[in-house]
Image (cartoon, coloured by chain):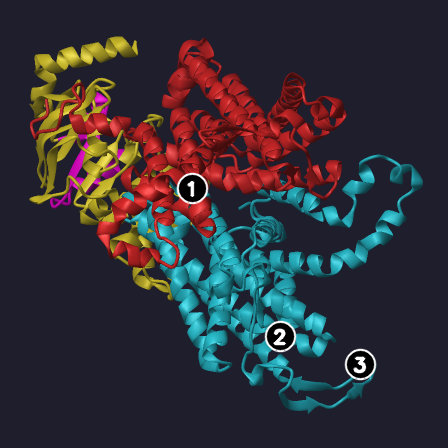
Chain colours: A cyan, B red, C yellow
Amino acid sequence: MTRAGPVLLRLILLAVLVALAFAPVLFEGSRALDTAARLCVMIVLAASFDLLLGYAGIVSFAHTMFFGMGAYGVALASLHMGRGPEALLAGTAAGAAAAAVLALVIGLFSLRVRAIFFAMITLAVASAVAVLVSQLSTLTGGEDGLTYRIPRALTAAETYGTIPAFAVGPIAFDGLRISGKIANYYLVFGCALALFLVMLRLVASPFGRVLQAIRENDHRAEAVGYSVLRYRIGITVISAVIASFAGALYAIWLRYVGPDVTLSFDLMIDILLMVVIGGMGTLYGAVIGAVLLVLAQTYLRELMGPNLLESLPPAIADLPVLPELLNPDRWLLWLGVLFVLSVYFFPAGVVGRLRGRRA
Amino acid sequence: MTTDGVADPHRPGIGARIGAAMPWLLVPLIAALGGLAMVVQAMPGPEETLAALLRTPDLWADRAAAALPAIAPSWITLTLAGLAMGMMIFLMASGLTLVFGLMDVINFGHGAFVSLGAFVAVSVLARFGGWTASTDLALNLAAIGLAALVAMAVAGTAGALFERVIVRPAGGSHLKQILVTVGGLIIAEQLIHVIWGPAEIYIDRPAALKGAIVFHGAALETYRLLAVAAGLTVFALLALVLRYTRIGLIVRAGVQDGEMVQALGYRLRGVCVAVFIAGSALAGLGGVLWALYQEVVTAQMGADLMVLVFITVIIGGLGSVTGCFLAALMIGLTQNYTAFVEPKLALVSTIAVLVLVLLWRPAGMLARQSGRMS
Amino acid sequence: MLRTLDLAVRFGGHRAVDGVSCHFRQGEVTAIVGPNGAGKTTLFNLISGQVRASAGRIELLGEDITRLSVAARARRGIGRGFQQTSLFPNLTVRENVRLAVQARQRKGGRMLRRADADRKVLAAADSVLGQVRLAPQQHRLASELSHCNQRKLDIAVLMALEPRVFMFDEPTAGMSADEAPGVLDLIDGLRRDRNRCVLLVEHKLDVIRALADRVVVLQDGRCVADGTPAMVMESAAVQAAYMGQELADG
């Protein structure tokens, strides 16, 4: 179940792990490091969503809300407690506690009657919270969000040492100052890796197996003696807490939180796309989906950018709608199509394809 | 016969009768509560806090009497606004709840038809600029009527396509339905961008529908009256069709027990498709009215409105048109009173209503009580 | 062991089960028979909790379980099989049984240990798979099994639960003549264990003769006869009930 499967899939996952582990050395520039950190966070966020969607068969639209709770927890604690590590810990803990309580309440309310209520109620609650956050500007900074200071040890101002430049054969290395920013990156990477490993263990545990049984046939699971409601609420809470941890990491990395980066419906759609296109119920699918989407969002525009439109033959460029369909701003259209096709034809997504087996 | 004091269902006691009437009583109750909240808010005099006033009960009667005439016109205006909003939400929600009741399909892409209807109406109204610029009410209504008809036709056609391409292949799995209909929503929003461009579009309400009638000092916007009339008409038509026509009978029976109807030989599939198309067309109509109400359209407007629509169908009870109607009015009223008293809490207040209703009836106000056999 | 007292349930105005009082003793195989719509499956649903009773009570070993959830009843020893085979289709045969063992051993809440590292659970699962002769197919998905093997797996899941009360709803439905005996042997094997009680909804008279110690006849939701197979088959009430059914079936 949790084996990564065939060679190609393992190689891809290994490549992602190596690239992320050595990102500060392998890629130059702060933008690449930003992308790598964002990727670490998104992998955790998407994987924790997969716990719900792929393993328990529950659709939630409030995952970004829990993500935002972790992020705002760190931001508010850093603003009000000062720039110490204890602020980061307290903020993370408070965000996680709030996420757990809210997830429990939503779960009790909506899963008790009909599992289908859950999708609708999470959508409503998440919208209400997003509106509230953008309006309670004295507390949350409103639409502008909050900027705050984190411990100096995690910022570019701190220097821990340097790796000297060297050249071995054709490989030349320019040298690297090991700054607090890099320490910050490894904090994010280390925590993300740990959380991912915890999730891998969770889905292979007796608890994780019961979730899969419930997804397959909840009546039977109940008749065998598993209280379906308790397990569903349990995974809802766990998934919310992990999402809040991901949010806390993102807040520590960005030193900024705002509704658009943590709470928006667009981000929720991104997570859905990552998990479904990568492959539901595999966790590794979340990795692959997150890599595809984050890289595409960061680099696709400049790769295909305006060149593509200019390179169209005039016969096509003069057609009324077609050029607009190929506009890079409309890439979500094609992702949407890919998403629907994935649900129908490759429910195990890219990972399922690589494993060469039906889900 | 039962022996442990279970009331005979054929002779409901007074409690059961109040319980049955309660969904209908909740709408005026919310209107009254809204008025009460407005009066309480208006009670403190200058230099006086509400908290201080609340500690001196002997002042209450005087202050309330003083606040009442000042607040009454606003209350009337807001009540009309709330009813108008509720009617528009009802239009968008009715199709969703019927489709669920009949086909057990939950359509997260329903909002796409709202947006589509709105954009189509914008295009139609732009063609008939002369009719909308005229101050002749009849010409204005003709323009809106025409726009509404075209929008409903387009939304209905899109609904037929959506049902065939997106919904039907998903089968009975709710998980798949939610996922593919969200995917359909993304695609639909992007296609609207492709056709109408990425920017929001501002439109003007037809000239004769811009003003308001003054009634006992309260301003009643003409357009809101129109929206209420449209909503009531659709509700009445739906109720009549469901009650007195053959297709209505099949739909009602199908909501009760789909397998039974199929066993009796009715082609439920065709009825389902028809209901889906009608629901999409109604959502398109809701979109037209909403667009003229807000005087701006965006591709996301449908998805944004779905939040209120979902709250409405859950409160009403999935599958119940009457429940949906009452819930929509409750939501519209609650939103408008709260927006007046404490604007930040408008959306949160509707969720509070949802929570209270679910505490009272866990499956919604008028949901079919589930005592089904496995 | 299991007792129902004036058990009744209404669907709308229809009384599907209407005042059934029965005592099912341990070590006994009870067949529940009756024409279609007599309330047999509904009685099963009431006992295992899928349907809540409108009136009356259900006791297991003296404990009132009328208001308990399905899962709580299962944990107390009600093992329910279904007429429509109900499995975890996209999990392996072994995983289906393993999940049942895991439920009996109350290990479903463990989150940080690997499920496949628990030898006690795996050994119990393998033993059951051996008994029902599904060991060769244990790594296939449940949905890939033949109908007959799916029913066997259904029984294996029940056996893995080691319930106090086994409930089989037409265990041989849809099976060919040479497939049915294998399944019936499995049920017959359960009789040797005198601590259990077996409830069987069954139409086929030969199955009832071969397996049942006692027959309860339901008609229109009421218990119209109760006794040994020989006694009950003779009685006029059963004749009437069964004649009715044969006419309906024909």
Please state the horizontal and vertical placement of residue A325, each as a whole percent of the image.
77, 41
* Chain of the residue under label 1: B
Residue under disc 3 on the same chain as residue under disc 2: yes
Which residue is labeled 2 in the image?
Answer: A21
Task: Give the residues drawn in magenta, as a range.
Answer: C184-212
Are marks 3 and 1 in one subunit? Answer: no
Element marked by disc 2:
helix
Asked if one can make out residue A220 in the rendered structure from this viewpoint, the answer is: no
Check disc 1 and report the residue beneath it: B337
Q: Tell me which corner region of the image, top left, top right, bottom left or bottom right, holds residue B296.
A: top right
Circle 1 sits in a helix, a strand or a loop, which is it? helix
Counting residues from the N terminus, which is met first, the one under dot 3 or under dot 2?
2
Label 3 and label 1: CA atoms lie apart by 69 Å
Quadrant location of the N terminus of chain C? top left
Nearer the viewer's eye, disc 2 or disc 1? 1
Q: Is residue A82 magenta?
A: no
Viewer-closest of B293 and B122? B293
Residue at mark 3: A171
Q: Position of residue C36 (x, y in %)?
A: 25, 18
